[in-house]
Image (cartoon, helix red, strand yellow):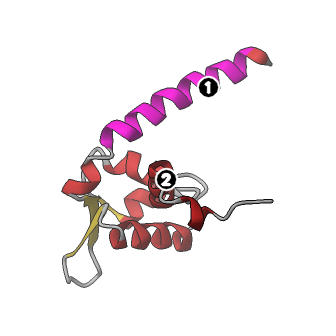
Amino acid sequence: MPVSKKEVGECPVDAMMRVMDGRWKGTILWRLQDGPRRTSELKRSIPGVTERMLIRHLQELVADGIVKRDDKKTIPPCVYYSLSSYGRTLGPVVQRMCSWGRSHLKRLSARR
């Protein structure tokens, strides 16, 4: 009989994955490691992401306290996104995931 995750207790890996869950969140965090970026800069740097999905993921990351949103209150709108101090604690995790991903891609390439 399947066991409900609610009955098992909080898993730290699940907690981290809930923050990172989303097709583009890892890429967004990776891009923001270089410093603040405007929405349009992020969109150009992430091929394939739609503006709607980018905004949605950014809003979720802001709500989780991982990303800061800095609205300059200008016309035309000028909004910058950057990692919060808490979000920067994910830096080593993102770097390690990137390193593992590169190794995995090489492995897949070698198998072909």
Residue closest to the eye, 59 or 37: 59
Give the mark toward the camera: 2 or 1.
Answer: 2
Query: Residue 56 at x, y = what percent?
Result: 49, 73
| Disc number placed over residue 104 in the picture, else none | 1
As drawn, is 59 to the left or to the right of 78? right
Measure the alpha-carbon separation of dots 2 and 1: 25 Å
Residue 45 seen anywhere in this rendered image of the structure: no
Q: Amino acid at mark 2?
A: Cys
Point 40% across, 40% down: residue: 94
Relative vertical location of residue 47 with respect to residue 18 in this rendering, above or below: above
Q: Which residues are magenta?
A: 91-110
Query: Residue 84 at x, y = what percent?
Result: 23, 59
* Screen quadrant of the N terminus: bottom right
Residue for badge 2: 11
Q: Which is nearer the N-term, disc 2 or disc 1? A: 2
User: Main SS of the magenta segment?
Assistant: helix
Point 51% across, 52% down: residue: 46
Q: Classify residue 95 by image quadrant.
A: top left
Query: Residue 21 at x, y = what percent?
Result: 54, 58
Regarding mark 1 in the picture, which secondary structure is present there?
A: helix
Residue closest to the eye, 101 or 93: 93
Point 46% across, 27% down: residue: 99
